[in-house]
Amino acid sequence: MRVGVIGCGKIAQTRHLPELLDNPDAQLAAVCDPDGDRAKTVAESFGVHQAYDSHESLLASSDIDAVVVCAPNALHAEISLQALRSGKHVLVEKPMAIVRDDCIRMVETAEQYGLVLAVGHNQRLHPVFRRAKELIACGRIGAVIQFATQFQHGGPETWSVDGAASWFLQGGSAGFGVIGDLGVHRLDLMRWLLDDEIAELTLYSAHRRPIAGIEDNAALALCFSGGAIGTIQVGWSNPLQDHRTVIYGERGMLVMGETFDGITLADYGSGKTEQETVALSLRRDGYLCSGVADDFIRSIRTRSAPAVSGREALRTMEALFRALPGP
């Protein structure tokens, strides 16, 4: 499977390119970035023979079967639609798009052309969360009553290849702030863990950075169709990071994120807690394999749905769009 990567920023360099390189069924055929020098440097680093400075040039190539879209959020829909219409499978980073109608067009176009549209919500593939879903599904904690989940880091300035000049901090390019960066991850995760849909969502946001239209801290209050309630807190103000998730059931509770590979199960009846260490899948460079690229390639080869299809991601985005303030 010949794959092109569009956008050579941090997520491409630290996740998608290394994981595609490790996949025996994928061939890194080309990279693209509007910064042509960056595209060439990244191509050399990963042994890619072709580097472009425009996505149109990459998409015009008949040597590409699939693309990974790591461009700024505001370009996700435009590039993904062009790729699908040129007959290429698409893995697009989250959020899938910044406008609801664009999300719908992406889903409909992929289905029209019979192509895979996958969205890079990696948390469903994390071994700790997969174990948590197993424990919930088999009834270890009973019906879920409520939850609280955190996703906090120091903001794009601390990890973007462009630092404080990152497009994440530019409203026109990002479309969202921390909600599009971290909030959609947790919305997708909780829908999946609970196997339920969001009935109500209320959003509160704060703006500590003097950037118009970019929220950098947010709290979301949710009610699911099955009755579970909970909160999601996301922020760009904690350089120490916080990834904790607590799920409270009728008979027990689960705690994740206090360690990278651990999960705690507490039983209300006995008062006992169990600590479980979950096996992680590591890349050859020693970092955690997200599983996103592998799942995308598997989906194409087996003609089966990816872990998070465009239609599945659309459900998360629709819940978010309903909660956003009107124009």
Image (cartoon, helix red, strand yellow):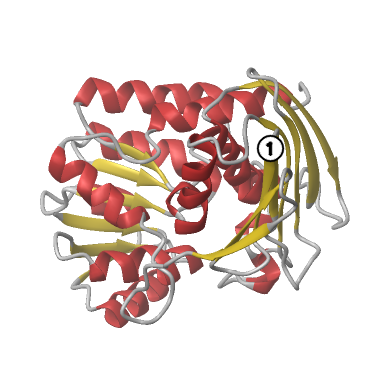
The picture quadrant where one finds residue 204 is: top right
Residue position for label 1:
251
Coordinates of residue 268 in the picture (x, y in percent): 74, 44
Q: Is residue 47 left or right of residue 32?
A: left
Q: Is residue 172 left or right of residue 316?
A: right
Residue plotted at (43% across, 54% down): 70
Residue plotted at (46% across, 49% down): 130
Coordinates of residue 242 in the picture (x, y in percent): 72, 63
Q: Of all residues shown, which one is farthest toward the front?
A: 270
Q: Of all residues shown, which one is farthest toward the left?
A: 62
State whether residue 2 is above or below residue 195.
below
Task: Pick whichever, 291 or 157, lies toward us.
Answer: 291
State whether residue 139 is above or below residue 271.
above
Task: Pick whichever, 159 or 276, lies toward us.
Answer: 276
State whether residue 278 is above or below residue 131.
below
Coordinates of residue 128 in the picture (x, y in percent): 51, 57
Q: Quadrant of the N terminus?
A: bottom left
Label 1 crowd (10 A; few <14 / some 14-19 / many >=20): some
Element class at badge 1? loop
Q: Quadrant of the C terminus?
A: top right
State whether residue 245 is above or below residue 187.
below
Coordinates of residue 57 in the picture (x, y in percent): 25, 53
